[in-house]
Image (cartoon, grey):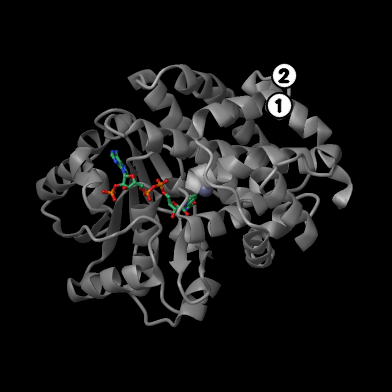
Amino acid sequence: MEFSFLMPTRVIFGKHCIANNNIEFGKHGQRAFIVTGKTSALKSGALDDVINALSGSSISYLVYNGVLPNPSVENVREAARLARDFNADMIIGIGGGSPMDAAKAVAVLATQDLDDESLFKGSYIIKPLPVIAIPTTSGTGSEVTPYSILTDAKDETKKNLSHESLYPKIAFLDSSYTAMLPYEITVNTAIDAFSHAIESCLSKRANSMSIMISLDALKLMGPCLFDLCSDKMVSSDNREVLLYASMLAGIAISQTGTTVVHAMGYSLTYFKKVDHGKANGLLICEYLRYVSPQNSHKIEQILKALNMRNIDELESVIDNLLIKPETLSDKEIDMFSQKAVLAKSVANTFPVPMINDIKSLYRASLGSGRNTIDNNVV
Ligand code: NAP
Ligand code: ZN
């Protein structure tokens, strides 16, 4: 056996974890630039908790609440200019994946001028500022990953910026921040985490530790998915389990990356405005069918962890949770496939799909007259 496993983020989990650990902030800086979306950081109570903790430690701060869902390169450049003007020495991201990812890109751009190519390549001359991440959704796991996913309008897609220095220094996870999350966002983000756990487990880069973590995440998520199907009121116990499981799934993808599912989902988000997690959910079952001949043992382990009999049962649960969007035209399938095949994460898929396989996956998942894809297309 041979592998390497890096997880440098200090995870502080539990109700009131910020108030109970407020001294942690001062270990990373004295001028905090806080990056959030429009309202959720405030509405969730997380922003007030952070401000109280900073004030108690006499740390100066400035709040930027302009991050949009699926943040663009321009969006993070604007925030980084303000962070520089403020002389920030640490960045705090509060919100879903969008503000947390934006915080990481701001941490890079606050210390150096980079063109888009160098930004995405990860060729950083100066160390990015330290990042502290506080999730208010239970999905992306961004609080424990070195990734920042940004929308690149020039190439009409989403791109992954990845660098070891972007692992947050601390992740504060308090499930009470997710209490007011609407049902639809709860479902979509839970399915994102679910997809991370599955993709990581099946990734070419998976190792025994990452597999153990992704299977544990799935074991916890299975009952929650069934509960979400039958009851739109999400219990606080399930909210805590979902937050923990999404963090585990984040640790798993931090080691292995995602796969063709995420690569294909980006066009659904960019062109069809489908939520990130939902986009993965619409593709995951056909992906499982595609990889199952070469991964039969792992598929068995996944289904056992979920306590489901087969992929058909899983599909009926996912169908129950997601409202299908319109179908894709042949022209869209061609264009989306050409973009997906260029994404870095495709190489993590086993077996690695060719462009025709990706077309088949789109067609089977979302084409007009959906039908099961041919497993022999590899
Ligand atoms: P999001 O885009 O961060 O937020 C979606 C919506 O949910 C926003 O309108 C947000 O409001 C709202 N919201 C967030 N927390 C809430 C709360 N507690 N109560 C009520 N509303 C709340 O959604 P996300 O699914 O968490 O993140 C998706 C992004 O993460 C995508 O860009 C995706 O590519 C990326 N991602 C990153 C990683 C990674 O490892 N870095 C992994 C997977 C996905 P506000 O706008 O007011 O905040
Ligand atoms: Zn994701």
Mark 2–mark 1 distance (CA, rounded to whole Å): 8 Å
Asked if disc 2 and disc 1 are in contact, CB closer than 8 Å, the reply is yes
Q: Residue 141, position in %: x, y? A: 46, 44
Which quarter of the rendering shows the N terminus? top right
Please tell me in which quadrant of the rendered image residue 241 appears: top left
- Is label 1 in a helix, a strand or a loop? helix
Residue matched to label 1? 312
Q: Amino acid at mark 1?
A: Asp
Q: Residue 369, position in %: x, y? A: 70, 43
Residue matched to label 2? 309
Which residue is nearer to you in this view: 204 or 208? 204
Counting every numbered tag in the picture gives 2
Q: Amino acid at mark 2?
A: Arg
- Residue at screen point 24% across, 61% down: 66
Residue 159 shows in the view:
yes
Q: Is residue 144 left or right of residue 287?
A: left
Q: Is residue 265 above or below residue 219?
A: below
Please tell me in which quadrant of the rendered image residue 182 appears: top left
Which residue is nearer to you in this view: 150 or 131? 150
Residue 196 shows in the view:
no
- Is label 2 in a helix, a strand or a loop? loop
Q: Is residue 36 left or right of residue 7?
A: left
Q: Is residue 22 above or below residue 154?
A: above
Q: Residue 353, position in %: x, y? A: 78, 56
